Image (tube, helix red, strand yellow):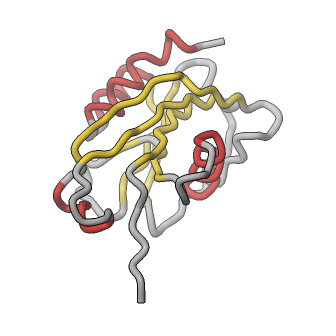
Amino acid sequence: MSRHYKIPESVLVVIHTAALDVLLMRRADASDAFWQSVTGSKRDASEPLVDTALREVREETGIDAAANGCSLRDWGLANVYSIYPQWRHRYAPGVMTNTEHVFGLQVPADAAVVLNPREHTSYGWWPWCEAADRCFSPSNAEAILLLPRFLE
């Protein structure tokens, strides 16, 4: 049986409202302090990043990022970071870094969130600066702090 490893190329999607309230979710497989935006790896090497972003947003939050009232934007930013040791087993042997492409998704203020309980245990909306302070991941916090630069 061959093992399916995660591809070390992923998306980070900062979901926010026009008022700059940011959605964060608490990971199910980490400590209570691990709050984050939507993240996820490409399904396969040929999957376009925008498709990865659309799929991950739907899987993790139930939000259809292509629906009327939503605006998904590729921010043209990428972060390369070391994969945390506790998650390296998900990647092929020797893979130590991941490239994360940053997107923003503006949603209506009343967007309904339905979490995937295998991935997240709770969620909340916070003003962007407070949301950045809550993030465990430095790249996630940095992306949230850049949010005002990418508003339409």
* Residue drawn at 52 percent across, 53 percent down: 42
| Outermost residue to the bottom | 1
The quarter of the picture where the N terminus appears is bottom left
Which residue lies most toward the left here? 85
Q: Between residues 39 and 32, which one lies in front from this camera angle?
A: 39
Residue 44: x and y, percent?
54, 59
Seen at 63% across and 52% down, the residue is 55
Vertical position of residue 49 compared to residue 115: above or below: above
Q: Is residue 106 above or below residue 84?
A: above
Q: Quarter of the image containing the C terminus?
A: top right
Is residue 135 depicted above or below 75 in this figure? below
The residue located at (47%, 51%) in the rendering is: 40
Residue nearest the viewer, comparing 22 with 143: 143
Rendered location of residue 3, percent (x, y): 39, 79
* Residue 128 location, quadrant: top left
**Residue 24, position in %: x, y?**
44, 41
Residue 100 image position (x, y, % from top left) = 41, 38
